[in-house]
Amino acid sequence: MSALETEVLIVGAGVLGAATARELSRYKVDVTVVEKNVDVGWGITKANVGVVCQGRDTLEFRPEYHRTRLLWRALPLMEPLCRELDVPFKRVGAYLMIRDQVLKEKLDKLARRTESLGLGSDRYYPYPELKEREPFISPEIKGGLHDPEIAVVHPVYLTQALMENAVANGVRLMLETEVEGIEAGHTEFRVRTSRGEIRARYVINAAGEWVDRIAAMVNADDFVLFPIKGYVGVLDRNCAELAGSLLAVLPEEPGDMNIVVPTVEGNLLFGIQLQINRRHDRSTTDRMARKALENARRIIPEISEKDIINSFCGYLMFRNFEIGWHECEVAMSARVPRFINMTIGYPGVSASPGAALEVVEILEKDGLKLVPNPRFNPYRKDIPDFSMLSEKERKALIKKDPRYGHIVCRCETVTEGEIVEAIRRGATTLDGVKFRVRPGTGRCQGGFCGPRVARILARELGIPLTEVTKAGGASRQVPLRTKQLLEEGGGDG
Amino acid sequence: MASRVDVAVIGAGPAGLAAAVAARERGAERVVIIERAEQLGGLLPQCIHNGFGLLYFKRDMTGPEYEKAFIDMARSRGVEAMLEAMVIDLDAERGITAVSRRHGYMKIKPGSVVLAMGCRERARGALGIPGTRPAGVMTAGTCQRFVNIEGYMPGSRYVILGSGDIGMIMARRLTLEGAKVEAVVEIMPWPGGLIRNEVQCLHDFGIPLLLEHTVTFIHGEERVEGVTVAKVDAERRPVPGSDRFLPCDCLLLSAGLIPENELSCRAGVEIDPVTGGPVVDQNRQTSVPGVFAGGNVVQVHDLVDWVSWEAEAAGRSAAAYADKGRLKRADGVRVLPGKNIRYVVPQFISGKDDVTLHMRVTRPGLKATVKVGGVMWKRYRTVRPSEMVILEVKGQALREAGVKGELAVDCEIRGGD
Ligand SMILES: Cc1cc2nc3c(=O)[nH]c(=O)nc-3n(C[C@H](O)[C@H](O)[C@H](O)COP(=O)(O)OP(=O)(O)OC[C@H]3O[C@@H](n4cnc5c(N)ncnc54)[C@H](O)[C@@H]3O)c2cc1C
């Protein structure tokens, strides 16, 4: 197999890789993205709470931090970006709250800092006023600082949209392609992947959880990453009224991250229960679940265990523990020219547009010619969301394509039309469909629609039902036909 | 939908079919069932085992046979059905919005509505089982559909969490398919389903039933590789050190059914927090006038025969309402669950007419006496939470006792568990 040649190779189609690919697609540059999973955005980006912040919600927020600067660049870009890509973006605002009056001083300090940096003036609401705005908060709360800028996005939708748009503008995306080794030459890198060799002048290492391992392949690992596991719980839609904004408690101990967040789809998330962990293991534990629920109930006592419809864990990759949380690395390696590391511990989603710009600047500074791509089209249309349409729009859509009249997922009101369109745009698995148009994310968690979505996938992809997977690899949903075990004499029952 | 609909029935499971037939028999002109699935019958087509109709038809039938009997009745009574049609909204004035591939976007304003959406199974997220998120975790009902309708098997080695009826029936079904069922794991000290299923589906096939156990962890990256099972204490918390690993490639969940009441809530129907279904009066009228409910949407039944009977009452009342534009509420007396009673349906009765009370006990016991206020009492050799207690109360007895306001139902137990 002859090697594929490309100018810029991006390793990883998470939000950072995708944002960079999309930014580069503005120029006539040959860009290839390799992703080991069957779909984009399934790394850290998938297990995320989707908050678009600028860092003023934490005490470690300092202008001298790199991540703060990235956030500042990114923040004004996020809303227009979401508009161009037709991705839901909701400015929900946030209250950074305290339970102990002594901490009020810290909030004042934060507010002063925000103001002195020209980022606006955040108002403090004592409990009675706060309760008028967020009626379900616990009486334990003494008050909260309001940050009206905080918004939410769906990080996986954003990543898919960025990647879809990048591909439409000429970027090459290779899924199920894992980087196994890299050799740094004088003018190019020879990258060994599970699908053959790729030669690239530049490598952008956006491998998320594995950024340090990829960097180590060429000795560009001049930083240390600490994996911290974070647990998030998902509440049923019928709890939506419990919080209209992001409700966060000012950390009382380092490492605390107690928040309740509305999503763009109207669920509430709660967490983030943190724990130092060995990497890769994304299992949820009973202890984390209990602690997270307990903490959430200290923000909104009405949150109940029976409203939890799902939970997940992700990894926050922290760099340099000592100087506080959330450091990041977006820079060309000091040891290996043309090798750029890209990792952001906490607000990677928020910072992604800024980080992408910075990478493009690094490339330009290094001599990469950036000629505008005349075919660049910044716009992308989202898959129609039947559940959000008006009556008139629904009628028109069904008229155009009757498959939009066939509702497959009852909990989230997802139609066959949307599922077919998700598959057309690259979903090849049950999770791929789920993370595009939501069937199975509601309260029955796919009990009703699971078999039906599987059948549509099999039909559209032209594969037998036994080959339909949850998320690629060995995750086949129904690997056997009935009678097969009896014929094979398998099973010893 | 051009011409007027008298009674619209939402859902074509056993409840919906029985309600529609009863509404027609009671004189409703145009009765339309709206069903989101591809076929009539709800869950019955996938219940290919027997045990249906013993009470209603005095015959031992399979699910499809029971379903066919009702579909035939519906056909001969001229009930109309819309398939692959989903009701997406119901308002407080009985306005229905539905969509389907064939009919497009529909607005229907029927004379009355019967809610017959049935129930759904509790999913993994709601059970909060810790662990990884591999393929091979699904509800027993979804597995049943795959095996019995689609002809596919989700795995070859199973653990079943929860001893609900569908779980126990699937344990037998999968064994007959040549799969190995390692165990049925039940957190409570008693099985969640009928005794007859425990005997016929588990004992007869040598499948272990682990009472007071739960699954504490799901293992496996892409596919389930096994589960950790542990004993639980009186608070239902895992006992440290009691855990062991059971290898399997599939975990089925059969740990509770939840009445499906999203539409009821949209219409503003009052929901009983215990049953999870609408609060109904003796006629199965909900708190919203002209909206009736029957079957598992009201309370999770253990026998389909009772689903049919309950839904017939709802169907008859709906026809009467459609005819006159109103139906007097039969809610003179509120029935309250008392000692060792988890709930009673209907929540309101007239206090004058014959009525069938459906109830579930909180704890099992021997030599039980169920007392309906000072009106009547009945002895039971055993009572179990998994087996509904059904009691006929005569109107005359109620009238003679002069019942007013509230009526408490208690269950006294003299024997132990
Ligand atoms: C619980 C939780 C909540 C969070 N909430 C927020 C929030 O509210 N707001 C916010 O801004 N940030 C949040 N974050 C942080 C944010 O999720 C991350 O900063 C961001 O997603 C990182 O994106 P990424 O592209 O670097 O990583 P990833 O999404 O992990 O992308 C890396 C990709 O590289 C691929 N890859 C890895 N190795 C290889 C290889 N060898 N070959 C090919 N491909 C490879 C992976 O499969 C993956 O798809 C949260 C994080 C967690 C854990």
Image (cartoon, coloured by chain):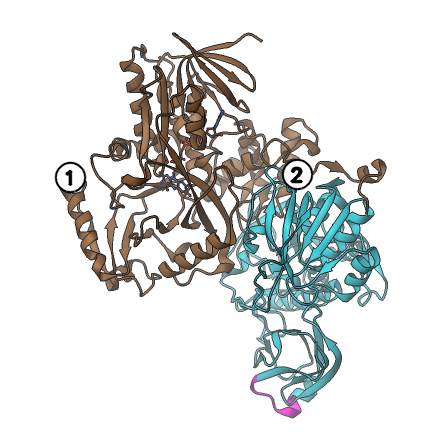
Chain colours: A brown, B cyan
Q: Decide which of tag 1 and tag 2 comes sooner along the chain.
A: 1
Count of numbered marks: 2
The disc placed on residue B138 is none
Measure how far apart labels 1 and 2 are at the Cα level.
53 Å
Q: Where is residue A265, by image quadrant?
A: top left
| Residue A99 can be seen, yes or no | yes
| Rendering coords of residue B174 (x, y %) | 77, 48
| Rendering coords of residue A73 (x, y %) | 25, 31
Disc 1 crowd, CA 10 A, few/some/many (<14, 14-19, 20+) = few
Who's the residue at 68% across and 74% down the image? B364
Q: Chain of mark 2?
A: A
| Rendering coords of residue A202 (x, y %) | 39, 15
Q: Which residues are magenta?
A: B399-406
Identify which amino acid the numbered label 2 is placed on: Gln
Q: State the quadrant of the N terminus of chain A.
A: top right
| Residue A90 can be seen, yes or no | no
Vertical relation: B297 (above or below) A93? below
Identify which amino acid the numbered label 1 is placed on: Gly
Nearer-the-camera pick, B67 or A187: A187
The residue carrying mark 1 is A118
